[in-house]
Amino acid sequence: MEACRPAVTAACRQRLIDHDDVDDAVQETFVKLACRAGGIRGDVGAWLHSAAVTTAIDFTRRAARRRHHLLLAASDGLLERPEGLSWEAIQHRLEDGLAGLDADSRSLVIARFLDGIPVHVLARQRRVTSSAVSNRVARATAKLRKALRDVGFDSLDDAAGGMVTRPFA
């Protein structure tokens, strides 16, 4: 499958701007392949290309949904902007903080708090118990707090107005 990696990367790169998103989309595409390997009929290369395109589009949609949630929260007064920082600066710091997490922690924080996926659904998707997901989310949130401190926020609430402790609906 390593021979297919350049084609998958190219398909993702056509649709994604951020290099890290491209890498994540490529990795997610190969995870999809591993999960569905026995059920793929026909040309695996064509399936991989289609899966890469779909995954890249999903990344774009998720990013748009995160921006939409942040804008809604800001307009509803759920987020209070720390003095001296623009919303754009806050968004960049949140993105930097999320980028500082490992892929699993980042995906958990995004799924739980930005996409609003309940713990029991995440547990079912990951084939683990709800308490295991809760523990992983708690560890990921702690890592995000540290990452946000590293990029200049003293507390997570400064960055997100409690967003990471209270999922969006």
Image (cartoon, helix red, strand yellow):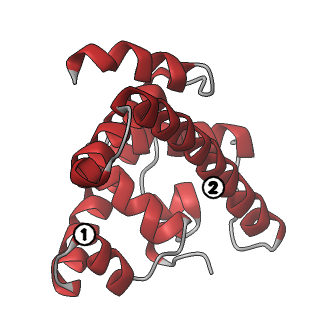
Q: Amino acid at mark 1?
A: Arg
Decide: is 55 above or below 18. Answer: below
The answer to whether 121 is drawn above or below residue 164 in the figure is below
Query: Which residue is at the front of the view, 156 or 28?
Result: 28
Percent coordinates x, y for residue 86 in the rendering: 74, 42
In the drawing, does residue 100 fall left or right of residue 165?
left
At mark 1, the secondary structure is helix
Which of labels 2 and 1 is toward the front?
A: 1
The residue carrying mark 1 is: 126
At horizontal 69% and vertical 63% (from top left) the residue drawn is 69
Image coordinates of residue 4 in percent, x first then y, are: 32, 19
Res. 151 visible in picture: no
The kind of residue tagged 2 is Arg
Callout 2–callout 1 Cβ contact below 8 Å? no
Q: Secondary structure at mark 2?
A: helix
The x, y position of residue 150, in whole percent, is 35, 38
Mark 2 and mark 1 lie on one chain; the one further toward the N terminus is 2
Q: Which mark is residue 41?
A: none
Residue 22 point in image, percent of width and height = 46, 27
Q: Can you tell which mark lies on residue 66?
A: 2
* Residue 18 in the image: above or below residue 65: above
Quadrant in which residue 33 is drawn: top left
